[in-house]
Amino acid sequence: MGDFKRVLTGLMLGSAIAATAISPAAVAADRTASQAGTQAARQPGTGRAAIDLSHGWRFHFGDAPAAVTATGFDDRDWEQVSVPHSWNRIGAYAQKRGAETDNRQGLGWYRLQVDAPKAKPGDRQYLDFAAVGKLAEVWVNGHHVGTHKGAFARFRLDVTDAWKPGQRNLVVVSADNSKVEPGSSTSEVIPLSGDFFVHGGIYREVALLQLPAASIDPLDYGGPGVYAHATRISAESATVEVRTRLRNAGPAPRSLTLATEIRDARGKVVARTVQPVTLASGTGEQRTALDLARPHRWDGRADPYLYSVTATLSDGKAVLDRVSQPLGLRTFRFDADKGFFLNGRHVKLRGVSRHQDALGSGWALTPAQHAQDMALVEELGANTIRQAHYQHADAWSDLADKAGMVVWAELPYVTTPSITGGKGSDALWANAEQQLREQIRQNYNHPAILMWSVGNEVDSAKGFGQKGAPPQPQALLAHLNAIARQEDPDRPTTFADCCEGLTLVQTAGETLAGTTDLIGYNRYYGWYYPKPLEVRQDLGDTLDKLHREHPGLPLSLSEYGAGGAISQHSDDVRSGYVNFVGRPHPEEYQAWVHEQSWPSIAARDFVFASWVWAMFDFASDLRDEGDAVDLNDKGLITADRKTRKDAFWFYKVAWSDSPALHFAGTRYLDRAYPVMDVKAYATAPSARLTINGRPVGEVPCRDFVCEWKDVALRPGANAAVVTTTQGGKTLTDRATWNGPDVERGGLRINAGSPAGLELPGLELAGGHLGSRHFGSDTFVTGGKPVVLNLVGFGGRSMAPIRTVDAADPALFDYWRDGDAYSYDIPLPNGSWTVTLHLFEPRKTASSDQALTVTANGEAVIQGLNIARAAGAPLKELLRSFPVTVRNGRLKLDFTSVSGNAALAGIEIAH
């Protein structure tokens, strides 16, 4: 790999097709407009004239008779749809699936009657599919015309022999997203596994191309046929080599002319060549070099300047074909010690990963939805995007070009090369190679794309429950790396590693680092790994260790993050159990993980890039967690794009180029306790807080986080104002939090839990209490939080499911466990009754176990054997006692001998 090992350099020119900017509010209108039917349009990706085939389709899911492909088949009872379309609807912010969920996997059938325009003698007819998930079979007028295996790439079929110009034609498509299992239709088509749902359907646009027999090649792995490469760039001039692939479908050679020109952003021609071409029957390639004076560079977010290049093929009488693409000129390099450089300037790449789905739409996204997503990424302050875990739509990459985002483009070689072990079959290798060539040729010209990823977590099969010996992914990874270098020698290759140096997932033990030019590490400190509260130190130490072990390998952090549910909240993120694959996922904990992670990343220049996992919550039928079902909730924004989570605001502040300020925790409106920790994000060195007009004080803002501890709340609304001054500019933000009326309603702690809990009310002497609001585990030292049932990834239970015999079993999902722990609770002075919710979680508890509890130093429980008093393990035991508070604090000390004591909850009331 030569110079690519220590310092990776690139001299590239790229292209993208301009996408129409559409406001986010126009999503629904845009989808309606895209269903206007068969009409002439300019095709995204080439600029060719095309016939739009979006309207008039009939759809049926499931088995169909053999006659389904025949013209006489009656499809009047089928559903009427327009494309883009997917039958799947996955994900909801709910505790279980609802009627709207459609997670069916299998065959979906589409039929379209097309009143085709007339064609000139000798013209060729091509059906163009931007993507079909996951396997596609296509028939025209009852004739099978082609197959495509892969859910993400554009493919074109020459249907001339079956097509009837000027007449009505029938197009039938079967889309197959069958579950991957031995012998299934999808078992040799990547991806074989992964933490995302593969949607079925014709989920991107479809068009008909009518081209002369001699044209720019439309069948070059779905690519544009025009490929531009800068061989030299300086301040004074640049040389651009343009390769144009041509196709002659006729029997005789043709004498033609190929004109190639480059225009600047204003449309002025700045370079042009004209070549005579003798094109034999079949395919050929023409190369030309064009010189530009004083080139204007594509410079990322600072200045994403785009030229355009156009190749025009003519026969002396008329234009036969024309393909246009925007172009971007830039140089770049990756240094193993110093990071990433664009046009000679060091740039710390900081960004997000994005999946191509949205709530309610699945993968069938409109241009307006792509534009909305990019606008949100820009708002965040990111300068790089990882396209996870597959080829994304042309519209998305076009937007990245125009926004100046540096892109990691990825092949869907995910998790494993085989579902039965080994290195993968010849058929799977061929499919992976096909999908890689498609991706590179179709995206070769995008200036935003600076690296080709040939895999993601390819040795993680055992983590997804695959049986047998771990597969061996390295051979296929190396093969794909060689293919990528063959297709594009000027961009480096990379892959995302899951497991090096970790023991959580059993692998075959193969060394993967060094297979590609670059590497990304998916590392979830604070989430999946032990000692989650040591995230900052552990992440930094790991990055340093990996850099020492691979000193010549430029490395990045390709994934990091945590789950976050906007309806679940924590009063103290350091006290509750971190249940990474269950419920709850407090929004505050997700934000804290990012607050801790970013400083470790920012301090290390050798980490050339980092990508938050992920920009948006996304569909995964392996997930049942947080406040959602079938959603991975690690997004900075909800899957419906409606809510920016606290972690989003942290990065918006941390990555801001101008003064910024934002309160955190504002969705946790109704607080459980009479005190709270107030947090704000700010670029200023310090911030001032007032509550209800009363100054609380000024605190330093370390690593963009400003915190005020134990701020007192009065019952009802509390108006908070935070103020910063920076560079002569004063900023303020406002929030309101409702404090509890502890005197009337009492105080409750959900021991061991990372989030609060609402339980039904009780009949009290003073009347009915409508509900009981437990705050998360807080005010505690000692012991440890424990979860009752730890459910593994994909719903696999780590142990038999346990239930507790209790009035409110949900209170026992977590508990505080230990032989010594204490709670120091803020409480108004007066007489109170404390109720402890205890139980024995262990079937083999010691008969000598004995619990002592003191309240403000006085013994209130002595020598209590919990299991004996409850009558059995996993059975609730209630113990109540009176206390008197005189100094505004209630100190409860728990001491247990001959075994730990399990406390699920504390209730305090008058």
Image (cartoon, rainbow, N blue to C red):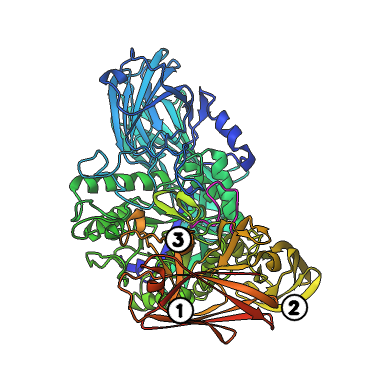
- Is residue 832 inside the magenta stretch? no
The amino acid on which the numbered mark 3 sits, given as a three-letter code, is: Ala
Res 670 quadrant in image: bottom right
- Residue 327 rendering spot, x and y as whole percentages: 51, 47
Q: 703 or 51: nearer the eye?
A: 703
Seen at 35% across and 64% down, the residue is 498
Image position, residue 81 (x, y; %): 47, 26
Q: Earlier in the sequence, mark 1 or mark 2?
A: 2
Which mark sits nearer the N-terminus, 3 or 2?
2
Helix, strand or loop for disc 3: loop
Question: Of 807 and 482, which appears nearest the observer?
Answer: 807
Q: Is residue 252 visible?
A: no
Write down the residue under mark 1. 783
In the rendered image, which residue does mark 2 sit on? 697
To which quarter of the image does residue 10 belong?
bottom left
Q: Within 10 Å of the Cα at label 3, are there few (<14), some (14-19), or many (20+) other Cα atoms?
A: some
Secondary structure, mark 1, is strand
Task: Label 2: state its secondary structure.
Answer: strand
Find the magenta span and give its range.
634-645
Residue 639 drawn in magenta = yes
Distance in Å between CA atoms under marks 1 and 2: 33 Å
Residue that label 3 marks: 806
Q: Is residue 192 left or right of residue 372?
A: left
Position of the C terminus by quadrant: bottom right
